[in-house]
């Protein structure tokens, strides 16, 4: 972790290594976020399958989890997936799922979610890590 304290312009993302280190079953959690139609469709599908996803902003092809893709391309587009009543940590997490985990700052998240950037920063930049939401680590000059 960087020794610099994050500010409202520090980019954050979902740190999937955090899930692995904390023995979180990522696929079980993702399945719980699927809409009813896809929970049924994926009931017997093995976890971990990836598909190629094209980032709509950069046209870069990235491998993504198949369940994550369904979340991004269908379930996340449903009005009940993310709304003004969604708890702040859940709203931030779901925002990263729907945007392909493209890093966003607390300021950008605040604008997208209609919430205070300061509250978002205090929530995700504190000592406790919620759902793997962490500052983006960039390689240092010595690496």
Image (tube, rainbow, N blue to C red):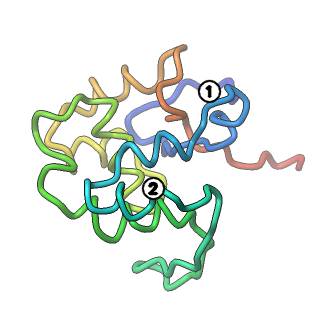
Residue 78 sits above or below residue 93 on the image:
below
Question: Where's residue 129, x and y in %?
Answer: 53, 23
Is 120 left or right of 125, judged from the image as shown? left
Q: Given the current orientation, which residue lies at the most extreme bottom position?
A: 59
Q: Are marks 2 and 1 in contact (CB under 8 Å)?
A: no
**Residue extending furthest toward the right:** 142
Tell whether 33 sits left or right of 3: left
Name the residue located 79 percent from the left edge and 45 percent from the top edge: 140
Q: Residues within 10 Å of mark 2 (few under 14, many from 20)?
A: few
x 47%, y 60%: residue: 68
Badge 1 crowding class, 10 Å Cα cut-off, few under 14, some 14 to 19, many 20 or more, is few
Q: CA distance from mark 2 to mark 1?
A: 43 Å
Q: Which residue: 48% across, 53% down? A: 103
Residue 55 horizontal/vertical position (percent): 47, 77
* Residue 2 in which image quadrant: top right
Quadrant in which the N terminus is drawn: top right
Q: Secondary structure at mark 2?
A: loop
| Numbered circle sitting on residue 4 | 1
Query: Where does residue 136 sit, x and y in percent of width and height?
Result: 59, 44
In the picture provided, is 1 more to the left or to the right than 113? right
* Residue on which the image places disc 2: 43
- In this view, 51 is above or below 97: below
Between 78 and 113, the residue placed more toward the observer is 78
Q: Is residue 95 above or below residue 87?
A: below
User: Who comes first in sequence, dot 2 or dot 1?
Assistant: 1
Locate residue 132, reporting x and y percent.
54, 34
Residue in the foreground of this view, choosing between 34 and 102: 34
Image mark for residue 84: none
**3 lies above or below 114:** above
């Amino acid at each position: 972790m960087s020794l610099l304290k994050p500010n409202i312009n520090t980019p954050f993302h979902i740190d999937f290594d955090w899930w692995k280190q904390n023995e979180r079953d990522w696929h079980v959690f993702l399945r719980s976020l699927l809409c009813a139609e896809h929970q049924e469709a994926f009931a017997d599908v093995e976890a971990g399958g990836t598909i190629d996803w094209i980032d709509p902003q950069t046209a870069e092809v990235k491998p993504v989890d198949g369940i994550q893709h369904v979340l991004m391309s269908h379930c996340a587009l449903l009005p009940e997936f993310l709304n003004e009543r969604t708890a702040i940590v859940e709203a931030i997490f779901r925002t990263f799922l729907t945007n392909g985990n493209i890093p966003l700052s607390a300021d950008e998240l605040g604008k997208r979610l209609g919430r205070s950037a300061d509250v978002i920063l205090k929530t995700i930049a504190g000592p406790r890590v919620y759902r793997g939401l962490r500052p983006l680590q960039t390689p240092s000059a010595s690496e």
